Amino acid sequence: MKDGIHPDYHIIDVKMTDGTVVQMKSTWGSEGDTMSLEIDPSSHPAWTGGGTRLMDTGGRVSKFKNKYAGLTL
């Protein structure tokens, strides 16, 4: 490998939305910096199973469902 072309890989603190702090290796910031997350696996619906419904803006979701209603795998 060439010297000097790769970013510095170091330990940072990552503060989750619930306040817990996890240490991870990263190229972000510098050694010992703290990254605060706005969304993480403990709060995002994609990881929690999602209690929210998809908003149907402009009827696109209903149009898709109607178009493929009879399709089975």
Image (spheres, grey):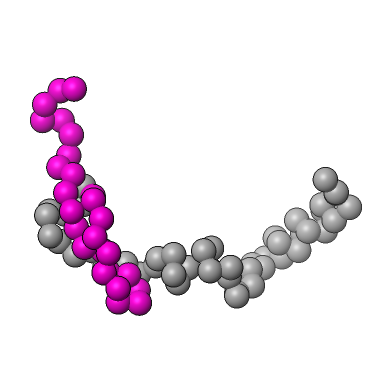
Can you give x and y, in whole percent of width and height, for residue 2 in the image? 15, 23
Horizontal arrangement in the rendering, residue 55 relative to residue 18 (left or right) = right
From what the image shows, is residue 26 above or below residue 36? above
Quadrant in the rendering for residue 56: bottom right
Seen at 85% across and 56% down, the residue is 69
Can you give x and y, in whole percent of width and height, for residue 14 in the image? 26, 64
Seen at 11% across and 54% down, the residue is 31
Residue lying farthest right?
Answer: 70
Q: How many marks?
A: 0
User: Could you tell me if residue 55 is visible in this image?
Assistant: no
Q: Check residue 5 for magenta coloring.
A: yes
Screen quadrant of the N terminus: top left
User: Could you tell me if residue 72 is visible in this image?
Assistant: yes
From what the image shows, is residue 26 above or below residue 38? above
Quadrant in the rendering for residue 66: bottom right
Quadrant in the rendering for residue 19: bottom left
Q: Check residue 45 for magenta coloring.
A: no
Residue lying farthest top?
Answer: 1
Can you give x and y, in whole percent of width and height, for residue 5 in the image? 15, 30
From what the image shows, is residue 4 above or below residue 29? above
Screen quadrant of the C terminus: top right
Seen at 47% across and 68% down, the residue is 44
Seen at 85% across and 49% down, the residue is 71
Q: Tell me where the magenta segment starts and ends, as one range.
A: 1-26
